[in-house]
Amino acid sequence: MSIMAKLNLTQLKRPTSKSPLEKRRDNLIQKLEEQSKLAEHEAKGTKYSVTKNVWTRDDAGNKTRITRDKLIRPWYFADGQGVSLTIRYGARVLDLGKGRKAVSVPAVSAIPEVIATVITAVKAGELDAAMDAAVQAGKAK
């Protein structure tokens, strides 16, 4: 038996680039997962932080790469009945249907469950029109 016969050989399949719609969905899902983790940590009373690498200059003018905490602003806030959760695409709040722009949640601890439902809706394409409207509103400026 030859050495090459021991390997699992397949056809070469190059990855195709994603459509703009798929890129938008992936971006929104990534941000929703980040908000879910932020809410989980807030419900536990711990701090959630994400780090990023940035370039900075020292006193001598030399560029150095450092790690810094990334600022993550919550998409939810307390209101009279509990917590309101908005869904954002970029800097714009998405219209979730008939002029409604927030989801009412009883407590911060329930936000990850709601976000999981929203992620399922994004994968199904239910927020594509709202994301497109947000992009068009940004281009109109």
Image: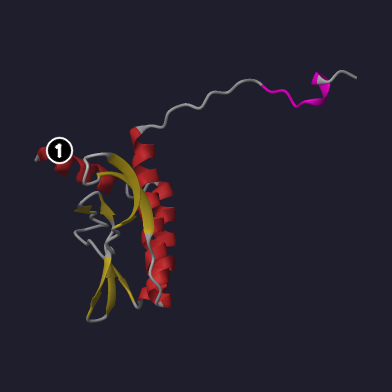
Residue drawn at the location 34% of the way across and 43% of the way down: 65
Q: Position of residue 136 (x, y in %)?
A: 18, 40
Q: Is residue 14 above or below residue 79?
A: above
Q: For this rendering, which residue is in front, 66 or 32?
A: 66
Q: Is residue 21 above or below residue 70?
A: above
The C terminus, quarter of image: top left
Q: In this view, does 74 lie above or below 18?
A: below
Residue drawn at the location 32% of the way across and 49% of the way down: 127
Q: Is residue 132 above or below residue 100?
A: above
Q: How crowded is mark 1: few (under 14 residues within 10 Å), some or many (20 or more)?
A: few
Q: Where is residue 15 in the image (x, y as percent from the top left)?
A: 51, 27
Q: Residue lying farthest right?
A: 1
> Which quadrant of the view contains residue 70?
bottom left
Tell me the SS state at disc 1: helix
Which region shows up in magenta? Answer: 4-10
Q: Which amino acid does label 1 sit on?
A: Lys
Q: For this rendering, which residue is in front, 21 or 78?
A: 78
Q: For this rendering, which residue is in front, 98 or 141?
A: 141
Residue drawn at the location 21% of the way across and 46% of the way down: 59
> Which quadrant of the view contains residue 43?
bottom left
- Return the residue at label 1: 139
Q: Residue lying farthest bottom?
A: 80
Residue 8 colored magenta?
yes
Q: Residue lying farthest left?
A: 141
The N terminus, quarter of image: top right
Residue drawn at the location 34% of the way across and 48% of the way down: 66
Residue 90 colored magenta?
no
Q: Position of residue 101 (x, y in %)?
A: 22, 61
Q: Where is residue 104 in the image (x, y as percent from the top left)?
A: 30, 71
